[in-house]
Image (cartoon, rainbow, N blue to C red):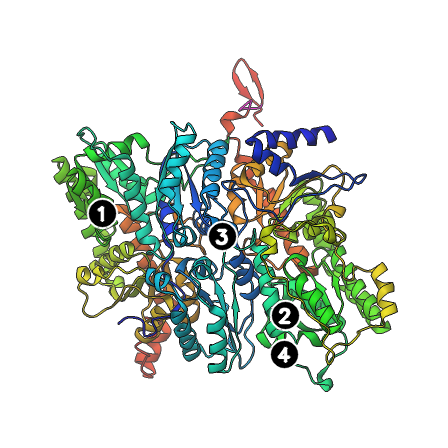
Amino acid sequence: MNKNYVNLDVNPCKMCMPMGGSLAFKGIENSMILMHGSQGCSTYIRRHIATHYNEPIDIASTSLSENGTIYGGAKNLKHGIMNVMESYSPKVIGVLTTCLAETIGEDIRGIIEEFKQKKDISCLDIIPVSTPGYGASHFEGYYHTIRNIISFYNEKQAIPNEKINIIVSNITSADIREIKRIIELFQVEYVLIPDTSETLDAPYKENFTKIPDGGTSIEDIKQMSGAKATIELSVLIDDIYSPGKYLEDLHQVPLYQCPIPIGMKNVDSFIKALCTITGREIPVSLVEERGRMLDAIVDSHKYNGEGRAAIYGDPEIVYAVTTLCNENGIKPMIVASGSKSYKIRDLLKLNESVVIPDTDFETIHKYVKELKPNLLIGNSEGKFIKEKEGTDLVRIGFPIHDHIGAQRKLYVGYNGSLRFLDEITNTLLDIKHHGYRERLYNEFYVNKGGNKNAQL
Amino acid sequence: MKDDLNKVVDKILDKYPAKVMKNRKEHILIKDSNENKEISANTRTLPGIITNRGCAYAGCKGVVIGPIVDMVHITHGPVGCAYYTWSTRRNKGRTREGSKNFINYSFTTDMQESDIVFGGDKKLAQAIKEAVEIFNPKAISIAATCPVGLIGDDIQAVAKKAQKEYGIPVLSFSCEGYKGVSQSAGHHIANNNLMREVIGTVDIPVEDQKQFMINILGEYNIGGDEWEIKRVLNKIGYTVNTTMTGDAEYEDIAKAHNSDLNIIQCHRSINYIAEMIEIKYGMPWMKVNFIGIENMSQTLRNMAKFFDNEELYARTETVITEEVEAIKDEMKHYKNMCKGKTAMLFVGGSRAHHYQGLLKEIGMDTIMAGYEFGHRDDYEGRDVIPYIKLDADTRNIEEIKVEKDEKKYRLRIPIERLEQLKKELPINDYPGLVVDMKDQTIVIDDLNHLETEMVIKALKPSFFGSGVKDKYIVQKMGIYSKQMHSYDYSGPYAGFRGAVNFARDTAAGIHTPAWSYTIPPWKKEPILKGKINTEGVEEVC
């Protein structure tokens, strides 16, 4: 089921590791990112994040030039840190490597140590993370970076505390706000990382600040190794990248891995984890939210039953969306991801669907032509398939460049899942209303026999 | 006023550590027509300063090569670079009958760790084979990303072999991201190869040669600009033989040497080719500007003068009159809305200059302008070229030497007339941005985020034309910011009809009611306007 052609990736369905690293650091309070490599890396990544979030995305570069590739980039890295420090006064600088830095074998840890010995930077933490563009995709880069941020502050185990660690996937700012609201209903303390709820969806304020407010605080991160438990909203990430696994293996923090809480089952398992860890009953308001969702999905099942979806994007989102589709009778015909998360096949156990990790959009397009789904569910890069095949696209994930408001759309929890499901159902209804009279007329009255594969 | 601007500049520089201050000072100048000031440009960006510059790969694949419609452009490298250049510049391209269009595609070898360790040439060769089998394109390009040069993949050899095997041109570009100091290096690398491998390889038979046949250079058809320009040129009677490289097919570029004149829109990205074509084929080039009504009209008149044909002169005037007549009322309306507002432009290597005329036409002065990757000649004019000190980064970019092609070289107009015209028209010349700026305006090269913030706070413009990376900083500061790379998915902005689009968008951006809410009512004093008497509020307005 893999790509027939294995050497040419046509219209990639994944980005590079430093992209994931940047998204992770964007959720850390008072932090700046310095990318060690050519200028292009930071420029391209900033462009892609800014177009999705409509927010300033400041990522500095060490601007390595040809000279640096020969003599090493230590000087550039040190100057880079110095300049970011003096002009932005952050508390944290995340140093991410790139293809260039990794290929020439830069010892960023060593260089940073040298820098620290010469300069007094007691109020600044410099966190190096190795993210070669060829190492893995943005999906792995994201978790790998969170893991590195946590391990940076938790070499020694923190004093045991009652907090719950929540490690979130690359979901929207609105989603993070919703997850916080749900946890707060349980009246427990928590550390959520990376918290992009404010940093990547900042309100208009009278005074512009260079580094946006919000983000997970360092003090909180330092307590993660003493937490009561970790809930990691990820079921597909390899153990070597998993931040929750690190905390479990090294500091014996019990780990609960749940899918992104999109879809009844997935929200249930998130809530169940919270109940188990806190020993509390599910709050009444959540019971009501669940009831409202259930009521709604009963009502809309007859429309959803006509859905046939091609789902693609980041593995965790793809997994959660597929669950939601399955719950509502929307047939997942194609389940695809650019990252190498082969585990998704075992977890989904879909015998009648095409499940393709490690693929590209050209392959997804090929299957769309063959299986004729009536819905595409994924990021905006599916727009080319939409344009060519006329298949409607319901957007979720990163990046969304052709619509606005991606950061404030809600997908998680019972409320978010229902809003998202409604969006899907209404898309199906729009398709239906667009042509069903003509189809019925042709099929039953003039008896031309309808095209079964036509859109509804 | 002068003192004020000096203070603004000092305030910006004050924020920097000493070394940075010294460096940045040379990139900033206050225009004063009484002295010729030098500006430092095309030098390395300081590490850690948040620049808007990109890399050589962006300039080569992203800007110059990418827009060629019927080629498969393979990015040889890990996945990111190809992903980030997938339809991100808005270079439009139409599909010709019987031909193919790969503009909406992104191709990459998606190199993995093992390819970095053991070399990626084999994978590249296989990828080319697959591209030929699946897509059967007219030609293929290979663009190298950072690791390729470092691990020593011989992309030239792979290309050469593939070209022989599949019988189609396979061009290879060693545009590794670390080369040069900005995307400008990539432009040069792209220019070199187009000149070496493509231009001059297909001759137009004499019977198919058209009168007034021209090439548009440095025009990438962002948002359909080239289509609007071409519409007007065709209306006058010109034949656009090729455009480099917006909406171009491979063969169009191969035929470029058959035209009579190269007209150059973006000087920075394509002047190398223009110069080389003149040396090799005897075709002169002329700097043009299609942005703004006055600039567009002047450009058309300059072109007519070059060809010196009565009918062409007459057509030019008729078309200008017609086109201006059709838009003048709308332009007047927008001018009324924008009059007296001020603008700042920070774009690329030409737009920061080109748009000043159009802004002026809607009543707006440009008070600050700068290029992301321009060279000194783009600021100060080509006269300074002999005096530019090349640093190591620029010297590392190959300068290719071309010679007169004895068979294909022909003078388009008599040499005496050409010499005479050079005195009257911008032939083989570009006077740069600074000369067109008003006194007491600021020019800043490679503007960074810190400076953007400072300069906006100090001079409070109504319009900031730049890119998406600084757009949201500027807008969070309460100033309208327009993306001058993607036109915020609007356009075209070139030519006559484009001018109206730009004027409309700009007026809308400056006047959106949103700005009136930036100060909430509870911060405005007084909240209620009206007379208060003993019985309460009266006549609230």
The residues bearing labels 2 and 3 have C-alpha atoms spaced at a distance of 25 Å
In the image, farthest residue toward the top = B534
Mark 1 Cα within 10 Å, few/some/many (few <14, many 20+)? some
Side of B533 relative to A230 (left or right): right
Vertical placement of residue B123 versus A291, above or below:
below
Alpha-carbon distance for marks 4 and 2? 10 Å
Query: Pointer 2: what residue?
Result: B195
| Label 3 SS | helix
Looking at the picture, how far across and down is residue A352, in whole percent? 20, 70
Mark 2 against mark 3, which lies toward the viewer?
Answer: 2
Q: Secondary structure at mark 1?
A: helix
Residue located beneath label 3 in the image? A40
Q: Which residue is mark 4?
A: B201
Circle 2 packing at 10 Å, graded few (<14), some (14-19), many (20+), is: many
Marks 1 & 3 on one chain: yes
Residue under mark 1: which chain is it in?
Answer: A
Q: Amino acid at mark 2?
A: Met
Residue contact between numbered discs 4 and 2, judged by CB atoms under 8 Å: no
Q: Earlier in the sequence, mark 4 or mark 2?
A: 2
* Magenta part of the chain: B525-529
Quadrant of the snapshot with the N terminus of chain A: bottom left
Q: Is the residue at mark 4 from the same chain as the one at mark 2? A: yes
Q: Secondary structure at mark 2?
A: helix
Task: Give the image location of residue B242, x and y in percent.
Answer: 65, 72
Relative to A208, residue B508 above or below: below
Kindly identify which residue carries mark 1.
A292
Name the amino acid, label 4. Thr
- Label 4: which secondary element: loop
Prevailing secondary structure class for the magenta stretch in the rendered image:
loop
At label 3, which amino acid type do we have? Gly
